[in-house]
Amino acid sequence: MLDLWYKNAVIYCIDVETYMDANGDGIGDFIGLTQKLDYLAGLGVTCIWLMPFYPSPNKDNGYDVMDYYNVDSRLGTLGDFVEFTVQARERGMRILVDLVVNHTSSQHPWFQAACKNKNSKYWNYYLWSKQKPKDIKEGIVFPGFQKTTWTYHPEAEAYYAHRFYDHQADLNITNPEVRAEIQKIMGFWLALGVSGFRIDAAPFLIELQQADNICEMVDDPIVYIEEFRKFLSWRQGNAILLAEVNELPEEQSRYFGNGNRMQMLFNFWANQHLILALVQEKAAPLIEALARLPEIPEVGQWANFIRNHDELTLDKLSEAQQEEIAAALAPDQEKMWIFDRGIRRRFAPMINGDPRRLKLTYSLLLTLPGTPVINYGEELGMGDDLSLPERHPARTPMQWSSEPNGGFSTAPSDKLVLPVIDEGEYGYKHLNVSVQRRDPESLLNWMERAIRMRKECPAFGWGKWQILETGHESVFAHRCEWNGEVAIAIHNLSSEPSHISLTLTDDKGSYLVDLFEDQPDEEVLKISQDIQLAAYGYRWFRVRR
Ligand code: GLC
Ligand code: CA
């Protein structure tokens, strides 16, 4: 039997810098994070995805790497990192780390060496052009913050390519030495105990550019991904690649291949349509989105999420749909909207912290076909700080307690890496782990129970899924079957209680066991079953035969 740990995993994303500061310098660190592993294990997390923690000038939250083989000294040492992985493993948790190799920081010694000397081997690590190539149409990733994708470097006397900020020079993937280097980086972190990589900006990584120094021409650069996957699997059979690929569903298949490329892809498509469905209080956008997803190989898996560390991008939706969402979730566009395509807020404030809608949404996250990915602080319904620039509003420090700085750090508050939210409804004094632990109705305690239930229903992660007819436009219902086990989840997206008649063609004669409420098992007497749902209500059932 295939034993694919990531199919029933619960992934939790952490930025070490803002999680827990153990030495009181205002910056989160590996020692602090290690102290919080029991909290994460208690929540039910089985896999931690660490955002970049490498030495970096930190002009893009660490996605501008200066040294792939080290830990940023502000966060700790390699020794602290290894100790952290050992302690995580003790608690049954795996680690994924960000592999940011579409580009390096312009302060990376490779780039510096290339600029100084065209004959250096590092020249061909990057993409150069004597003349300024035309900017790729719609190629600017950070509109409003980034002007071009080719910048002149006076010392190099040439233009270098950068799909992101100009301080993030694109690596030349057509250079076999660059690919060997990438494999070496993977090998290094695997040897230190990680279980795989989040592949940053995957489509850009394999894009062939108009540079003068392309080293080899291949028909389809996706072969480079196969090369990485082969390396990975030979080094460590159960390690995975989880790729950031925000493309149309039809384009996504090729990133899975026949199971020989990425194992996991973030489900941006489902995410954007889920948000639309929540705003419209209608199931159709989500149903249609799931229907358009490609078939994926047996070892493939979707990584579902509600909010990540970037903007909530809505770029795959029509302009009218984007406007509809913006009007509902980001009414102050000036402050809340970014890059002409997304929202800078955290999820809880977007829905005014409504506990019913929070639970509804995270219940969807935990049951949609795929593996859930939770961003730190989501389990508390943390808020945002819109006075911060760019994507930072959603990146404030974790709120642990009512102590100064939310218990994140003992440093003076003006020394913190980012300010803690200290005012209003989302301020740390009332919104924190310690308060929510004591409240049986809190989101944190709900999340812990829901995660436990999700893990006990592997059909959601592994199963063949189908949409069930509900006869109600606001209700989304689906059924997952795996190894003879059937799990059903029903979500009422509307603010009105609903009565539905659920079509259960395959389950007549069985019983529905409610997994959250203390309800008697319901016998499925007819193919259509009457079900009651509260406003924004959700129900999970196991089918007992
Ligand atoms: C990815 C990251 C984002 C970063 C970009 C450039 O999109 O999620 O945070 O800015 O890559 O590395
Ligand atoms: Ca620190």
Image (tube, rainbow, N blue to C red):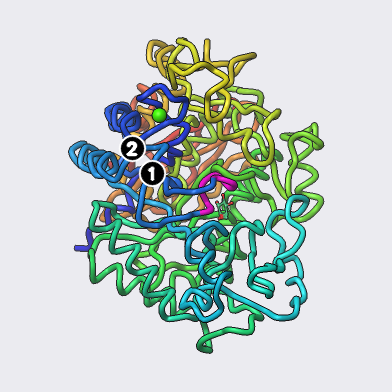
- Provide the residue designation for mark 2: 45
Q: Quadrant of the N terminus?
A: bottom left
Q: Are marks 1 and 2 in contact (CB under 8 Å)?
A: yes
Residue 200 lies in the magenta-colored region: no
Q: Marks 1/2: CA distance?
A: 6 Å
Residue 439 sits above or below residue 314 on the image: above
User: SS class of the residue under badge 2?
Assistant: loop
Q: Nearer the viewer, residue 287 or 408?
A: 408
Q: Earlier in the sequence, mark 1 or mark 2?
A: 1
- Majority secondary structure in the magenta region: loop
Up-down relation of residue 405 to residue 335 (above or below): above
The amino acid at mark 1 is Ile
Residue at screen point 35% across, 22% down: 518
* Residue behind mark 1: 11
Up-down relation of residue 37 to residue 191 (above or below): above
Q: Residue at x 67, y 79 (%)?
A: 129
* Residue at figure coordinates x 29%, y 27% from the top left: 35
The percent position of residue 232, horizontal first and vertical second, equals 30, 67
Callout 1 secondary element:
strand
Q: Position of residue 54 (x, y in %)?
A: 42, 49
Image quarter for ligand 2: top left
